[in-house]
Amino acid sequence: MYVIGGIRNEAKGITNCPTKHLKEQFIPNGTVRYAVKWRYKILFTIGENHINIVSVFHTAQDPNKLIDLKFNII
């Protein structure tokens, strides 16, 4: 629960200033950004009035796996 709670708290903090986070370089469309908590990337998109968390990715994995992830990004 400690890790899950930490990731949730980091995700809640994204709403304060979502554009300060970098765009994910391994996802080609350029609309996915990420925040980092420990060794996890919280991948998200910025909507008009909302933030959409699309995935949580452990950084020990091959980052090229991100290319293969299927996101329903509007």
Image (cartoon, helix red, strand yellow):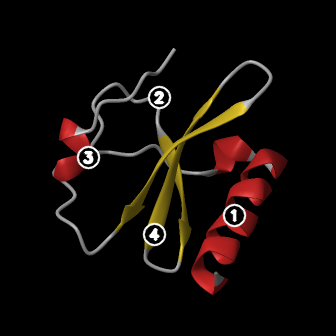
In this view, 14 is above or below 31 = below
Find the distance from the CA under tag 4 to the CA under tag 3: 13 Å
- Return the mark for residue 8: 1
- Secondary structure, mark 3, is helix
Which residue is found at the position 70% from the left and 44% from the top? 18
Residue extending farthest front: 1
Label 1's element?
A: helix
* Left or right, 30 with reference to 61: right
Q: Which residue is mark 2?
A: 31
Left or right, residue 64 beside residue 6: left
Residue displayed at 72% across by 52% down: 14
Whether residue 25 sits left or right of residue 42 in the image: it is left
Which residue in the structure is indicated by mark 4? 40
CA–CA distance in space, label 1 to label 4 = 11 Å
Seen at 39% across and 46% down, the residue is 24
Amino acid on which disc 3 is placed: Leu
Q: CA distance from mark 4 to mark 2?
A: 19 Å
Disc marking residue 45: none
Q: Give the mark nearer the N terminus: 2 vs 3.
A: 2
Of labels 4 and 3, earlier in sequence is 4
Considering only order in the chain, which callout, 1 or 2, is on the residue closer to the N terminus? 1
Task: State left or right for residue 15 relative to residue 71.
Answer: right
* Dot 1 alpha-carbon crowd within 10 angstroms: few under 14, some 14 to 19, many 20 or more: few
Q: Position of residue 20 (x, y in %)?
A: 66, 50
Residue 8, image x and y in percent? 69, 64
Depth check, mark 2 against mark 3: the one in front is 3
**Tag 1 and tag 4, C-beta contact below 8 Å:** no
Tell us which disc is closer to us: 1 or 4: 1
Number of numbered callouts drawn: 4
Numbered mark located on residue 66 in the image:
3
- Nearest to viewer (mark 3 / mark 1): 1
Q: Secondary structure at mark 4?
A: strand
